[in-house]
Image: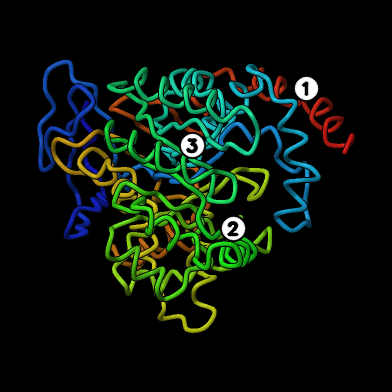
Amino acid sequence: MLLQNIRFLITQNSERQILENTDVRVEEGLIEEIGELEARENEKVYDCSDKAVMPGLINTHTHASMSLLRGISDNKKLEDWLQEDIFPAEEAMEKDDIYTGALLASVEMLKTGTTCFNDMYERPDQIVEAVEESGIRAVISRGLFDWDDKGKERIMEAKEAVKKYKGHELVTPGIAPHAVYTCSIELLKEMKDFAEEQEVPYHIHVSETEKENRDLEAEKGLSPTQYLHEHGLFDESVVAAHSAWLSDKDREIFAETGANVAHNPAANLKLGSGIADVPEMVRDGINVSLGTDGPASNNNFNLFEEMKTASLVHKLQDPRDINERQVLDMATINGAKALGLEDEIGSIEEVKQADLIVLDLNDSELKPFYGARGLISNIVYSYTGHPEKVFVNGELVAENGEVKNVEQRGLLKKAQGKVEKFDKARSKE
């Protein structure tokens, strides 16, 4: 496959080069060459005149199957939202619901330019099925907690999933304890040892709310970050979702250990959970990536919108505190690094996987652009995420808003048909 006559190639490589009037060749899912290239005999050629090509976006914190709970509960604090509405609705989740929700999420992400997501939820087999059907890439972890008598069962499921999906073409397995307040220290340590043994990411909620911090400090005299670090659980494989209430000492631990933050500004704002100190994190050298959280708390998976939110919320005190280049990094190469996939995705470089999106420069949201710098500004501040083409692993998986392998009308009808069940489950509480 050859992408030819690319007007702007936004590489996101270490120099953050934006190449003009160039070509990209893809062979067997990998980027083979970048430069002025001639088409080979029988090679599939895409004319990218008046197009920008950039890496697919990487969503580092999701609960994909919760797409079925979009809009089920609004205007509540996190604890009330969970206890009164979300947990009761989730009790009604069955295998087909997990699959349907994950497929709906995958379609939405591909249509809006996300080519990889990092998920924490139950029944990983159903989520993998949705990933395979849609063609998206994912890091999939069975969410873990042991406040009841099923902790050992969940641990066994998580370990089995990691072993089952290692080496999968599109799926990287991971380990995902929910949080310090839902998991015993025994679970946290056992699963960290297992994650290290299997060399997979360790995905956990950290300091999402001020209450989470207050409660642990009252009990242990430590913040969640300090508690995890004291037990040897913080390193570069950790993806700490939210991190909205980090102290100076917490940030020092992140910087020293190489742990990663998955920043979820829209969900944190919607639930009133807080605003993470991202400019300070960036200045401290912490790797900050970008996530949407689940669509019950955001309420979508659109990382282009999330980039704009991240940009604006951190300009509140001073517009110089964050810039569009830093935010684009969060949604691409920083996300790849957080997931341990920086050698495979996140930038357009030779030998990396061809996870690419093609933007039409004649889109009104991208015009006018003041050269390459202005294009990045438009992508972050004005573009709402509707790429012309989306490639994952070198395969064209979405084009002009249609995901190739999914019959979307039937999927949407099926999803809508599940509303009554979840609404009834919530209403019982």
Residue 129: x percent and y percent? 49, 17
| Residue sitting nearer the eye, 99 or 202 | 202
Report the amino acid beneath label 2. Ala
Mark 1 or 2 closer to N-term?
A: 2
The number of numbered badges drawn on the structure is 3
Look at 32% across and 74% down and name the residue there.
Answer: 283
Q: What is the quadrant of residue 67 in the picture?
A: top right
* In the image, residue 260 above or below residue 200: below
- Rounded to the nearest whole Å, what is the CA distance between mark 3 and mark 2? 17 Å
Q: Name the residue under label 3.
A: 119
Confirm or deny contact between disc 3 and disc 2 (CB under 8 A). Answer: no
Question: Under tag 2, what secondary structure?
Answer: helix
- Asked whether residue 50 appears in the rendered view, the answer is no
Mark 3 or 2 closer to N-term?
A: 3
**CA neighbours of label 1 inside 10 A, class few (<14), some (14 to 19), many (20+):** few
Q: Residue 304 carries which label?
A: none
Mark 3, mark 2: which one is toward the viewer?
3
Q: Name the residue under label 2.
A: 266
Residue at the right extreme? 428
- Rounded to the nearest whole Å, what is the CA distance between mark 1 and mark 3? 24 Å
Report the amino acid beneath label 3. Asp
Q: Mark 1 points at which residue?
A: 417
Residue 5: x percent and y percent? 22, 42
Residue 76: x percent and y percent? 78, 56
